[in-house]
Image (cartoon, grey):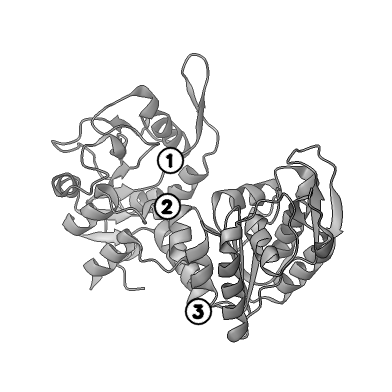
Amino acid sequence: MTILRMSDLDLAGKRVLIREDLNVPMERDPSGNARITSAQRIVAALPTLRMALDRSAAVMLMSHLGRPKEGVWTTQDSLEPVARHVSALLGMDVPLVRDWAGGIDVAPGQVVMLENCRMNVGEASDDETLSKAYADLCDVFVMDAFGTAHRAQASTHGVIQQAKIACGGPLLMAELDALANALEHPARPLLAIVAGSKVSTKLELLSNLVPRVDQLIVGGGIANTFIAALGHNVGKSLVEHDLVDTAKRIIAQARARGAEIPLPVDVVVAPEFKADAMATVKRVDEVGDDDMILDIGPQTSALYGELVKRAGTVVWNGPVGVFEFDAFGNGTRSLAQAIADSEAFSIAGGGDTLAAVDKYRIADRVSYISTGGGAFLEFLEGKELPAVAALRARAA
């Protein structure tokens, strides 16, 4: 991929501005004190920071947190808890700088953090003046926040165009390399698992994957719409009847190129959507009017497991059942275990997918775990991510 990489640059003595995605979840006690509940994104950014420090760069760290109102500073939207956590993990003081417009005093081997960039007026609109202000802070701008690469904002897009030198950081490039490995040069067969509540939210993704994959497993509410497309009753299950014809068309497209969309042969149903609802396994053609499909059945789990076992590449986005309820999590657990046991190159992404990866403790057995969220989905949909396009343009 023709993008200048931070790892190829001499950073000694340079002012380096690094855009990370440190938008971590927090909870606050009654006194307002914040506690970070998952530091995964901070931990993922540490190798980039350490590489810059090891190369004697003067490091400025930039991120967003939540959705504050531009031009308004509040304690709740401040990156102060994140700065404290980064300080602890790096073993060095990382001061938070709120007023940086006149320049920042940072020496080689030091790190400072800029206050929440989404508080800056013009951030969301990719304002040119703000982009230039970011660029004026540094000799090198490093885009390392894949999770925001799909947003054309001042800190993720405009600054790339304005900076003296703009490059991709190790975390961003690892993500792009992994996705290219999975989609552009995959080991065959290529198996994609796409699950979620609605076909409508994953329609572009499904349409983009059908011409590429050898097998496409659909799960969750999406699978219900495909089951209905085959003429089966889905009872009270979540289903989009207006997209049944779309599901039929996707199945036909797959068959026309010799690809396969295997659908459940058995399912787990319940009379209502509750954790303690009675779970019953039924053949897919036995679902009654009062049933809700909440998981795939054991036969389907075994069939899907065999597909994973034979795959050369597995792309996983979405649990195949309501895994939050243990009675309806066996399908997702079985699939997760099959991916963990597989020798295929595997990449997992999306919030619910990562929650399943954590729940079933397979993180160290998935080849690559995407931190991208929306950017991960848009890449899979075949869209050009604004930040990636800007980096490519700078390298041309």
Residue 23 tag number: 1
Q: Residue at x 62, y 85 (%)?
A: 258
Where 258 falls versus 106 (above or below)?
below
**Is the Cβ of the residue at disc 1 closer than 8 Å to that at disc 2?**
yes
Secondary structure at badge 1 equals: loop
Q: Secondary structure at mark 3?
A: loop
Picture residue at 53% right of the left edge, 78% below the top: 212
Tell me the quarter of the picture where residue 187 sits: bottom right
Q: Is residue 111 left or right of residue 22?
A: left
Task: Work out how far the residue at label 1 is from the one at label 3, CA to CA, in angstroms.
Answer: 31 Å
Instruction: Find disc 2 in the rendering and name its residue.
Output: 147
Find residue 115 and name its label. Answer: none
| First of labels 1, 2 by sequence position | 1
Choose between 208 and 351: the one closer to the eye: 208
Report the Cα–Cα distance between label 2 and label 3: 23 Å
- Is 103 drawn above or below residue 1 in the view shown? above
Kind of residue sitting beneath label 1: Asn
**Disc number at residue 185?**
3
Q: Position of residue 178 (x, y in %)?
A: 50, 67
